[in-house]
Image (cartoon, coloured by chain):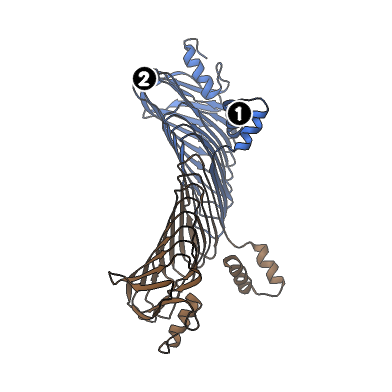
Chain colours: A blue, B brown
């Protein structure tokens, strides 16, 4: 990590990308609208895109066991940005991509980062993608994150996404679109926590276009205080395919949740399943932990971290 | 049953209301826009409504083990009607209501029946409601049924609905709305079969407004040939309540199905669950029945009738 980083910046990079120093492999660290540092490797090339509003990441065929870190942090109140990052992943790769955004807003103006990502995943390639979102700061200005993630999967590719909103994000509109060719596999693990008067919308549109393609989307969320969530996962089965989505949500306090999943079977060999459940933490679970010596608040925290883990 | 009934009319009443003679209890038989016969009882009064576009059915408090039959048939091509039927069910009742509509269209014009029903279910009352829809006839004119069913349930009441579309309905838009007070219970068993180029939309909007209210909606459907179905069941939990919806669908041939359930948790003590599954008949099931001597078509029919049974 550059010496120029403030304690706050270091803390944010730690939260969103588990970075506590310069990452190994390729990376692009962005803070308050500027590139802090960037590094390409022999197989992974990162460059500013031609529109100068983001980066292109090109990963060569057969790149294995390498990683790319592209975290973003914002610490200036009132900063708003739309950033376009495009990943071109060759064939037969196996790579880890770590993104994420942390906002610390100590002022009274809205701070917003809209990250528009595309992933072109080549044949037989496997990508693991980790994205964490986090907000902090004592200011009254809103912290807003609106990610758009569009995935194009070539034959026999695997995309595994872990998408986490830890806490502190006032408003988010998350859109994830995936298009799968034959035998491609798309797996999502989403974790969402909202509190206070936060709003979170999470929308998925997954098109299983190739024979043998599959999707498995598991979303777990917790709405505390007066927060609101809308979860909308749509799978279209347009070929011989398997799709599964699951939304499990816990409501607490005055939280409200709307789950609107949808299944679209357009092919006789499409097999699609959806499950959703919304409820509060079971009283017995709380009591059990409280008999072990935790107070009610600690017991709840324990259950929440288990549920989101 | 009146002597004036034709064989075709008798057949239709049999299909939609299992009637093979004059029903016992109260009834109102309607054919081609006219009342064929009507009978009230000491406890159940049926009268034409003040707008003269349907009937009002008043059921006295404490009416038990009685039934009302109000089937409708249409045999004239080009006949289109909107009929309003309002049920006022007193307290502490236990009644069976049989509705249903059969259309036989031998001509080339559209025949349509839109039945708008409201049910006001009094405290501690139990209603079992059975509605069958059926179409037949060699004509090219469409057979259309657009039922709207709105249920208002007072405290501690039970509404059990069995809604079946047997076959032959070219287009249907089914809307079912339920509003539940404390400890009321709403149960639906829906069975839907579409074939050829038929379209079926089925929408539920259930509001669990009272503490202890519950809903259980189970929809099973089959889309054959080039038919299309959209199933949209929404449960809003606005109190301490339990809601469950389940959509299980089989697609065959070039059938397509869109399932868009939704759960809306607006109260911390709302517990809501949804399940949906779409797929084709499992090959193993077919093979098993075929080894027992059935041909493929017979085996499919066997599985379908078991699934919809």
Q: Residue furthest top?
A: A3
- Is residue B187 found left or right of A285 in the rendered image? left
The C terminus of chain A lies in which quarter of the figure? top right
Disc 2: CA contacts within 10 A as few (<14), some (14-19) or many (>=20): many
- Compute the Cα span from label 2 to label 1: 35 Å
Disc 1: CA contacts within 10 A as few (<14), some (14-19) or many (>=20): some
Instruction: Place residue A161 in its image quadrant.
Output: top right
Provide residue B248's location: percent of width, then percent of height: 55, 58
Give B29 or B48, whichever is nearer the viewer.
Answer: B48
Instruction: Place residue B205 in its image quadrant.
Output: bottom left
Provide residue B18's location: percent of width, then percent of height: 51, 77
Dot 2 or dot 1: first in sequence order is 2
**Residue B259 in the image: above or below residue A84:** below
Residue at (44, 68) in percent of width and height: B197
**Residue B299 in the image: above or below residue A297:** below
Q: Which residue is mark 2?
A: A77
Give A250 or B25, whichever is nearer the viewer.
Answer: B25
Instruction: Mark 2 vs mark 1: tell me if same chain.
Output: yes
**Residue A240 in the image: above or below residue B137:** above
- Is residue B179 found left or right of B18 in the rendered image? left
Label number found at residue A299:
1
Question: In the rendered structure, the residue with mark 1 lies on which chain?
Answer: A
């Amino acid at each position: 990590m550059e010496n120029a980083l403030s304690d706050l910046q270091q803390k944010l990079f730690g939260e969103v990308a588990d970075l506590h120093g310069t990452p190994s492999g390729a990376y692009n660290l962005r803070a308050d609208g500027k590139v802090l540092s960037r590094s390409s490797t022999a197989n992974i090339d990162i460059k500013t895109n031609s529109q100068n509003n983001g980066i292109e990441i090109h990963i060569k065929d057969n790149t294995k066991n390498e990683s790319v870190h592209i975290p973003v942090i914002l610490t200036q109140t009132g900063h708003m940005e739309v950033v376009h990052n495009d990943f071109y992943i060759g064939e037969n790769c196996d790579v880890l991509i770590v993104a994420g955004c942390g906002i610390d807003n100590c002022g009274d103006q809205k701070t917003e980062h809209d990250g528009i990502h595309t992933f072109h995943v080549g044949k037989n390639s496997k990508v693991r993608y980790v994205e964490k979102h986090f907000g902090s700061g004592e200011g009254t200005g809103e912290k807003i994150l609106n990610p758009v993630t569009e995935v194009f999967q070539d034959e026999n590719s695997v995309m595994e996404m872990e998408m986490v909103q830890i806490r502190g994000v006032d408003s988010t509109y998350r859109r994830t679109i995936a298009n799968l060719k034959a035998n491609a596999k798309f797996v999502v693990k989403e974790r969402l926590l909202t509190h206070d008067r936060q709003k979170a919308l999470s929308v998925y549109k997954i098109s299983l276009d190739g024979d043998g393609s599959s999707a498995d989307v598991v979303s777990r969320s917790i709405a505390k205080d007066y927060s609101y969530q809308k979860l909308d996962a749509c799978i279209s089965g347009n070929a011989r395919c398997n799709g599964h989505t699951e939304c499990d949500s816990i409501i607490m306090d005055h939280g409200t949740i709307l789950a609107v999943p949808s299944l679209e079977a357009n092919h006789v060999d499409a097999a699609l399943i959806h499950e959703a459940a919304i409820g509060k933490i079971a009283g017995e679970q709380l009591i059990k932990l409280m008999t072990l010596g935790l107070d009610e608040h600690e017991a709840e925290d324990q259950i929440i971290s288990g549920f989101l883990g």
